[in-house]
Amino acid sequence: MDTGRQSAPPWGAFAIKDCALVAIATGRRARTLLELRDELRTIDPASIYFHFWGGLLRSTFDDPRFHNGFAIWADHGLHDTALAERLSVIDPTDFGDMEHLRARLIEVIDDDLAETGLIPTAREGAEFDFVRSQIVIFDTDRRLLNPAELPGAVARMSRTSIFYHFVDARRRTPDSVDDFTTWLIDMDREGFQDLCVGLASIDPFYGSLVETREAISGIFRDFFGE
Amino acid sequence: MSNLLGQYAEVAGKDVVDHLRQLAAPLSGMRVVHVNSTRVGGGVAEILAKLIPLKRELGIDARWEVIDGNPQFFRTTKSFHNALQGDPADISEDSLREYERVNAANAESLRDELRSADMVFIHDPQPVPLLAHTQERCGKWIWRCHIDVSKPHRPVWDYLSEFLAGYDASVFSMAEFAQHLPHTQYLIPPSIDPLSDKNVPLDESEIASVLETYGLDPTRSLIAQVSRYDRFKDPVGVLKAYRLAKRFTPGLQLVLAGGGADDDPEAEAVIEETREAAGGDPDVHILLLPPDAHRTINALQRAADVVLQKSIREGFGLTVSEAMWKGKPVIGGDTGGIRLQVVDSHTGFLVSTPEGAALRIRYLLHHTDSMAEMGRKAKEFVRENFLLTRHLLEYLTVMVSLANRFEDRIELG
């Protein structure tokens, strides 16, 4: 691993970054499904981001069926498991931006309201609090010059670094892919195609960031060797 | 790596400490002052006692100031505390004027420190008016609220919020505690210190010695609640749960252990109520411990089969994470910050009544495999979420945020 002395290769060095995330109250909350839908119409996009991705930075024993805060509340707060399942299968990386993701959430909720004709309500104290987050990104000054360094480097990355490069990247990159894939494709699209398919098969929503790190590192080890 | 940070790296992981260093780098040399109302007793003092030296090791010029008060001042702020947690309280004009007078006097004695600080963290309601008495301040002021203000008694909240309006930000432990305030409200749960006397591993002999000191039988089941003697902690409800459970576990013993704090004048009355409710039961041990009895508390938590924190209101309840860190499942009141720590049926149980607590005590004492598995999960949950290093990291993130701008993404360097 390089700390800046060697010159970068033509495809550029991989800059290992890290991040810290802090939650911020929006002051908006919902007790009924109707209120959730109405708040979703105007809530800060950063809140939608937080409720889809922010939970990954916290270990949890929540039901692994549900992958975002809206789905978890639909099940645990409103006891509407069907809605929870429909909200949970929404893959945020399928949407070009937060506005499309917002529209899809509202559509699913509207369908549920129309289908059941009921307005599920949470008990007092179990309201949904809309939270947004602020993410601070910093450079670790560590650089990878050669892809063969990936297995060892990934194994040593922090959970938050994995979050930044493998999860947050999907929101930042034009193709909604992780940073490793972007770097490898820039370098040699054909040569690393199978490797990138392997990376795409890792679902960060099914497991902790530590498990995700092990999965990524394992794929790199299989490809490049120890 | 410096000594203190090196010790934390051994418990929390080297990458966690590296992370702290990287995030602290742009804050190097910053003057930060934390202000609260007691140096000993209670969770806030315990957190600050370690947070300050850690910040200093990270290159931040951090200081801790404690305001002075008189009995009337602390009676008033205790009434504030209760009112903010929802207890209706009628606070006299005279008491409010004394509260403001004491703060004005403290602002005067801390004037240079507060004026020149880059950031000032004011903890809980006691020192809130300091800002109003600090003219020409240079830095950002942040109110750190450690208590459950989800349903405050309105007149008291309205009174305090006038002082809070001038702050640059607030920090609450949970989203449901956030209020209508004209500034950013960060959400940071507090934490425990794994290296403190209250949480370090203990030898079996030390635990046995503590049990002997307090007349506890190590061969019989033991349940414990460790917290200040405060009605919101519901010690009488714990006694009721114990009695209901004891019918099915005749040898059951209960320890209620806690102390007062310098800023809590009600503790004595609550102890008396609790003793009266215990009715002389020889298996109920009501211990009033001094503020420095950390290793004793540590031993009692480790000796207990099950730990309770049956609060009816709770800002956070650090004793929950303390017990979980020792591999104990916790039966906690379904309120406030306990909900963040006790993941129902995974790291313990959430209950709403003494009857619910009794049922869960019986379940755990009769399912020792489940008890052990929950304890294992509880410890890992605390390692990931409630250690001091995570808390410090989020403070640093807030400081970076305030030193930069309020955008969703801040890229340093």
Image (cartoon, rainbow, N blue to C red):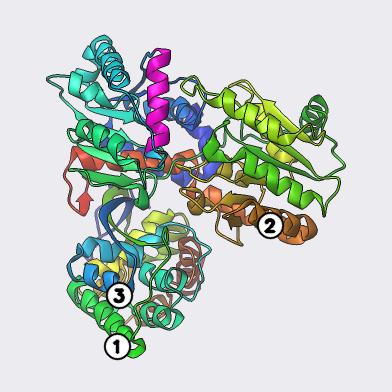
Q: Residue at x 21, y 54 (%)?
A: B409
Q: Position of residue A138 (x, y in %)?
A: 28, 48
Part of the protein shown in magenta: B70-83
Which secondary structure lies at badge 1?
Answer: helix
As measured in the structure, the alpha-carbon distance from the residue carrying label 1 to the one carrying label 3 is: 24 Å
**Disc on res. A92:** 3
Q: Secondary structure at mark 2?
A: helix
Residue at 57% x, 44% y is B320
The mark found on residue B360 in the picture is 2
Q: What's the distance in space between the residues labelled 2 and 1, CA to CA?
A: 40 Å
- The reply to whether the magenta stretch includes residue B214 is no
Amino acid under disc 3: Pro
Number of the front mark, 1 or 3: 1
> In the figure, is residue B236 to the left or right of A140?
right
Q: Is the residue under label 1 in contact with that under label 2 (CB below 8 Å)?
A: no
Q: Quadrant of residue B152?
A: top left
Residue B70 visible at all: yes
- Mark 1: amino acid: Ala
**For this view, does A121 lie left or right of residue B184?**
right
- Work out whether residue A116 or residue A180 is closer to the camera in this orientation and state it: A116
Report the number of numbered marks: 3
- For label 1, the residue is A114
Q: Say above or below: B300 vs A203.
A: above
Q: Secondary structure at mark 3?
A: helix
The chain containing the residue under callout 1 comes to A
Check residue A187 in the rendering and tell me which mark sits there, or answer none: none
Density class for disc 2 (Cα within 10 Å; few <14, some 14-19, many ≥20) is many
Residue A140 in picture, x, y percent from top left: 32, 47
